[in-house]
Each structure stands twice: as structure tokens, then as C-alpha cells.
Amino acid sequence: MRVLLTGAFGNVGTSALEALLVGGHQVRCFDVRNKANERTARRYQGRCEVHWGDLRSADDVAAAVRDQDVVIHLAFIIPKMSVTGVESERRPDWARAINVEGTRHLVEAMLAQPTPPKLIFSSSVHVYGRTQNHQPPLTADDPVDPLEHYSKHKIECEEMIRASGLTWAILRFAAAMPLDIRPDTGMFDVPLENRMEYVHTRDVGLALLHAATSETIWGKTLLIGGGPRCQYHFREIAQTILEGMGVGMLPEEAFSRVQFCTDWMDTAESQRLLDYQRRDLTHYVREMQAVLGWRIPLIRRFRPLVRWWLLRQSPYYRDAHRAGKRRQVPGTVV
């Protein structure tokens, strides 16, 4: 099968690419050209076709879509750790031009083909908004309440795809962290008691592989998560990862108290149709440690310095620390 994979050299993109190649498919990779993506592309040289381009260019997109059977659309500007170096919430108009208008270019190019390919669109659990006061788990039929530009873009794209006339499937992903984890200030935005479902990036890749060849998912919106054994409170996730890195758990005041847009998900239907849930958080930590390699002993050796540096990245810790200092000064009004 000929598969166009947009955002092919990102976190989930490389997992999907590896799964598709193992599955024997012809993969055309579409992504923006930069140094990070070029390094990743070299790992797959000779095994896939690479189309460098920009979703904002209708011509680039049309060339990539030509003669494909299935399109897996992953490319999107995200709130944190974007490969572009720009976050969706800092430049929402720029992000929308890529996320929404880029998806529009993709849909139009697909409809222009003599035989339009099928479309698999990657959405997110973020579209539900803050749900910690609700009874879990989330289902595909629950109402959406997108709060940030990123999730609003996802919903706009979902609606566009449903109305397009294409054969489509929408997959809403749980938290799928990259194996080459980097310090991300976004982790401090999640309260420690927030429910969060984890899904291994390689399991997402497997789900996308099985989706591409499925006869039963079309016209469905499916939730892609790790299943009941991957349903945690964020405290468990943060502690497991930070201890696995050699950093150790950070103090509670480093984390937000405002609900974050994640939750546990009902993945029974997606697992029945796509059979992808293989791994849990312990698998992730082992693979993360293998990627970090020689850096873990260094992190442990300089642990106080690393912890100090990480805590400096938390606005909540800085605010709590400043408030504590003010309380120690006689006569200070807090």
C-alpha cells in the first residue's frame, strides 16, 4: 500500500514510519525541512521517499498526495516542544495557517485525485478540555470543550474532515511522550493529582499501521490510549520518569494546581479494532534510559545542580519561593 505520512519525522511520525516499513508499505514522508528532520530522515535513507515541503503551500501538498492510497496526517504545530521551535499558543495565527489551512490544502488535494485516498487524522485528548470533575473515562461521544488554540485547531480540522466527502477516520491520542525526552517546562503545568492516560509512542505507530489497512474504522472517531494499565495520576508518571532519569521527584510546589486537559479514556473499541496496546510506562522508562545512556550517570553525579536548573524552569516554584521569602519579611503583606 502507498501511504503518505505527514509529520513523518516527529515523535509519533517516526513510530508510524517504522511500523509501516516493517509492515511492507511504500511510505512517502512529508515534513518541513530543517536540521533536526534532516538528521532523522538520514536514518531511513533508501527505505522511504522523502518530500520536503510546507503545508501552507498547496503545490507542495498536491505533489505529496499524488498517487497515494492512504494519507496519515500527523503534522501539526503543538503547544510545547514543537520541532519548528515555535509553540502554537505563542503564535496562534501562524500555527492556524499550518494546522487548519494546511489540513484544508491536504483535503482539497486528496479530493482532486482521480481516486481520492483515505484519510487518517491524528487528534488529541486535549479537545475535551478540563474534565477532572467528571466521571472517567472519556468516550468518543463525550462533548468537546477545547480551551487552547491547539485543541481548537484540532476540532476545526475534525469538522472539516467529516464534511469533506472523503473516507476518513479520526484518532484522538492520549499522552505519547518522545523517547528522547528533553526538559519540558510543560510538565509543570500538570497538577500531580490530574488523571492522565499514557500511550507508548510505538503503540501509536502500531495503531496507525493497523488503521491504514483496516476495513472497519472508516467514519469512526476512536480514542487511542494505553488502556487501563496505563491510567495514572500525573504524580506516578512524573515520579517514575524523573527517578528513571536519575533526577528524583521534584517538590509539589513546582507543579500547577489548575486542571490540565488530560484524562483516562475508554479505548475498548480502538483496541478491539486495531489491537495495538503492547506497552506501559515501565517499557517507556527502560527505552528512555537506553536513549539517555551515558548521560544518566552524569545526571546522578550532578543531581543537585540538575534539580536546581529544572526548578528554575517552573514558574509555580518560583512564585512559591518568592511568596515564602515575602512571608519571612516582617510587615510584608501577602
Image (tube, rainbow, N blue to C red):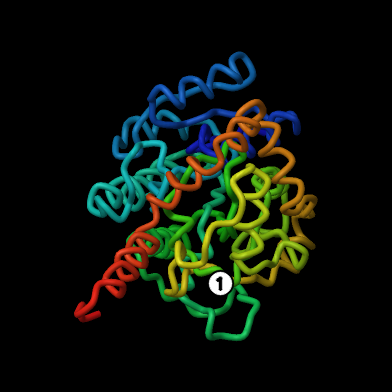
In the depicted structure, whether residue 178 falls above or below residue 23: below
Asked whether residue 293 appears in the rendered view, the answer is yes
Front residue of 209/86: it is 86
In the depicted structure, whether residue 190 falls above or below residue 3: below
Q: Quadrant of the C terminus?
A: bottom left
Residue at point 45% right, 59% down? 188
In-image side of 114 versus 109 (left or right): right
Provide residue 192's location: percent of width, then percent of height: 55, 68
Residue at point 64% right, 43% down? 246
Provide residue 178's location: percent of width, then percent of height: 58, 42
Front residue of 168/283: it is 283
Residue at point 32% right, 65% down? 319
Q: Hey, which residue is sitting farthest top in the picture?
A: 46
Provide residue 106's location: percent of width, then percent of height: 41, 44
SS label for mark 1: loop
Q: Residue at label 1?
A: 194
Asked whether residue 163 appears in the rendered view, the answer is no
Q: Give the amino acid at mark 1.
A: Asn
Q: Hey, which residue is sitting farthest front in the picture?
A: 330
In-image side of 270 versus 99 (left or right): right
Provide residue 21's location: percent of width, then percent of height: 69, 29
In-image side of 117 versus 279 (left or right): left
Mark 1 is surrounded, within 10 Å at the Cα level, by few (under 14), some (14 to 19) or many (20 or more) other residues, namely many
Residue at point 53% right, 68% down? 262
Picture mark count: 1
Front residue of 148/311: it is 311
Q: Quadrant of the N terminus?
A: top right
In the depicted structure, whether residue 103 falls above or below residue 328: above
